Amino acid sequence: MKYPNSILKLIDELKRFPGIGEKTAQRLALFVVNKMESEHVESLSEALLMTKSAITFCPICGTFMEESCPICDNPNRNQKTIMVVESISDLIIIENGENYHGLYHVLGGTIDFTKGIEPQDLNIDSLLKRVAKVDEIILALNGAVDGQLTSSYIQELLKEKTVKVTKIAHGIPVGGDLSYADQRTLAIALENRITLKE
Amino acid sequence: MKYPNSILKLIDELKRFPGIGEKTAQRLALFVVNKMESEHVESLSEALLMTKSAITFCPICGTFMEESCPICDNPNRNQKTIMVVESISDLIIIENGENYHGLYHVLGGTIDFTKGIEPQDLNIDSLLKRVAKVDEIILALNGAVDGQLTSSYIQELLKEKTVKVTKIAHGIPVGGDLSYADQRTLAIALENRITLKE
């Protein structure tokens, strides 16, 4: 006996997620069939569609938004500072720390020639367009080679602009991702940021 | 900034799966928002609903079926032998081995007083009703205490019936689950099954 077709299809769909292989997908699909209440299957199915259709990305900073951007359109935030982050996940980690109240710019990745990610694949041009409106750009990229290379690249681009450029301090373990750092470490890293250009 | 409501809702829904906690649910939800193609989100959403509505359970053996039972309604299978398994997952493991071609009976668990699972919570009564039609009942439960207790319980119930009762051999590591056994081990365990009652 093979799995019925509808289950095979569900297993295939679940395998699209990173970190979910054949065995885990089978386990999740069997859970849907055997244990999950019908109403919960419906609400999960609906939440997937809703999320995908309701969420758009802010054309200015690149974070996700529903009707208005929770960052750019918030008048209580400091509009004179932009923190450059790799991803929305990193933005949320910084936000959870509650130590920073300025704007953001989500690059959508880091320069990584080994993976074929070049500067033009990232939201760097749109960052340059925002520079004139702010006093400080804080680079908050990861401590590994790709993050540091991207920091240097952006620093080079901003050399001639009249804006202060800083980089969060190495409170983050060298070679580590932001997502492994605790909030205290992140707070220290932000407090001790190094001025790269005045 | 908090996650937008639609993402928070999706995270909550994903957390219903066993083994998916807050962090993994966040990671999966962000993948849906950032990386997954809209058409794939739609097909996943649809597959969830389809699976839940298309799949029913065979009223005789308890395995899942779409229109007809792939086991009970297959005339090529030996209708005179029933293998008793804990779950549909175990049934599929046995099927993948292609060493067994009889019928099944899915108990839906094992007796486990520590978890409050008593004999009446399992499909044991429905097994007793099928006994008269077959020549042999093969008990293929796990090698841990709960599986062996359940085997003994069923063996006791069948003592007075005119049916052969066998148990798959301890090729399965003692204390181990069926899902960890390789197909060769399962084949040996089936071949060397021990007659408990002639």
Image: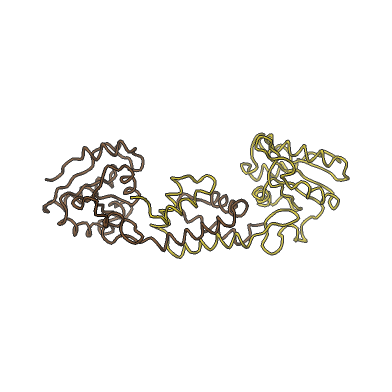
Chain colours: A brown, B yellow
**Residue name at image x 67 percent, y 38 percent:** B116
Residue, x 65% and y 46% (percent of image)?
B183
Q: Residue at x 34, y 58 (%)?
A: A65
Q: Nearer the viewer, residue A152 or B21?
A: B21
In the depicted structure, whether residue B23 falls above or below residue B9: above
Q: Is residue A172 left or right of residue A157?
A: right
- As drawn, is A57 to the left or to the right of A48? left
The quarter of the image holding the N terminus of chain A is: bottom right
Where residue A182 appears, as percent x and y from the top left, is 34, 37
Q: Quadrant of residue B59?
A: bottom right
Q: Can you tell which quarter of the image residue B64 is in?
A: bottom right
Residue A14, image x, y percentages:
51, 55
Left or right: B24 with respect to B120?
left
Quadrant placement of the C terminus of chain A: top left
Residue A49, given in percent of the width and then of the height, sits at 46, 62
In the rendered image, the residue lying farthest to the front is A76
Residue at position x 82%, y 51% in the image? B129
